[in-house]
Amino acid sequence: MKKLLVIFLIFLWIPAHAQNIKALATTDSLQYNIGDYIDYSIVVFAPEKYKITLPAVKDSLKALTFLREGKTDLVKSKNGFVTTTFNFVLAGYDSLKETIPAMTVTLTDTTNKSRIKIKTNQVNVVVNTLKINLKKDIKDVKPVVEIPYNWERLILILLGALILLALIYFIYKKYFRKETEEIKKTQRIILPAHKIAYNKLRKLETEKLWQAGKIKEFHSGITEIIREYFENRFGFNSLEMTTDETLHELEKAGLSLDVVETTRKFLQNADMVKFAKFTPMPSVNEEMLKEAYKIVDLTKNDAETEVTEEVDDVRRS
């Protein structure tokens, strides 16, 4: 309900602020009990060309506890603006009135690298203690009630189980051939990361998913291949990261700005299809496949070759 309300407010916002960049901070409620999850979100409305950088939300909190960062949601509007929702989970473990301060959001223009800084609004939350009726008498802890156990029944069950196991073992030894195990060494070829990615992209291409109307499956599959390639090639778990986290790791790996920008557009296009129910033109699907091959071409390690290793091949007879 909270996400639907935020998206509704943003779309009301768009016509009146079509040329403005905005940032809004919200929580799913204003009143909480001790230990409740507080869903805190920062919603940024900006043109698609901007890269968004948030401050460290965890470091901005005083009395509240930062638990984790949630999934980032993207919704693209027809006028070229993108609504990006950053989700966080907080909690309060004491009664308090806390003001989550305004957060400074930095937007970097990917075309000329100029920067804009805007602030969100403050959000006030109240964490209440659980209500206790002090007028009622304090009751003693009830004594432990011992339930008598039927030992005779337990002994009969155990005896029956032992007889059954002995019978099964006798039948097995008498009528079934004893299984033998043979271990042989076999060789396995380990392909380099870029060859694995090429093979999977070719297989995805032959499946013709988007031509059959399975557009979301196509975009999920192609981004999974590229994220898995990043994991094998650069050693970070892109499958469990957001788009911005993946781009940050690629920048740390020393890739050029052109490669990072190509990857950003590729992942964001796929995110819009998967999360914002955006239906692209057929030409966009074709371009996504070309971009996937291009990303692998630009980042592959030509020095990486096939490796052959020996593994145990266990055969039972």
Image (cartoon, helix red, strand yellow):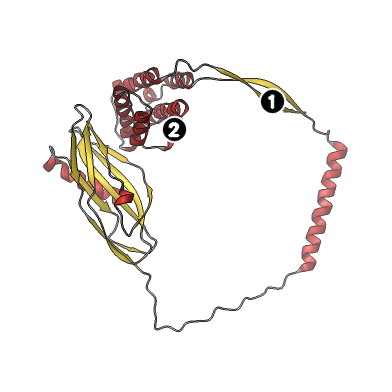
* Of marks 1 and 2, the one in the foreground: 2
Q: Is residue 237 left or right of residue 103?
A: right
Task: For residue 1, say whether it is visible.
Answer: no
Instruction: Decide if residue 139 is on the left or right side of residue 298.
Output: right
Tell me if residue 215 comes above or below residue 59 in the rendering. above
Label 2's element?
A: loop
Label 1 vs 2, first from the N-terminus:
2
Determine the CA span between mark 1 and mark 2.
31 Å
Which amino acid, by three-letter code, is at mark 2?
Answer: Phe
Q: Secondary structure at mark 1?
A: strand
Residue 159, located in which quarter of the rendered image?
Answer: bottom right
**Left or right placement of residue 43 versus residue 307 in this view:** left
Q: Position of residue 34 (x, y in %)?
A: 37, 64
Q: Which is nearer the eye, 107 or 209?
A: 107
Q: Is residue 181 visible?
A: yes
Question: Residue beneath label 1, please?
Answer: 313
Q: Residues within 10 Å of mark 1 (few under 14, many from 20)?
A: few
**Residue 253 — which label?**
none
Which residue is at a point 43% across and 21% down the rendered structure image?
201
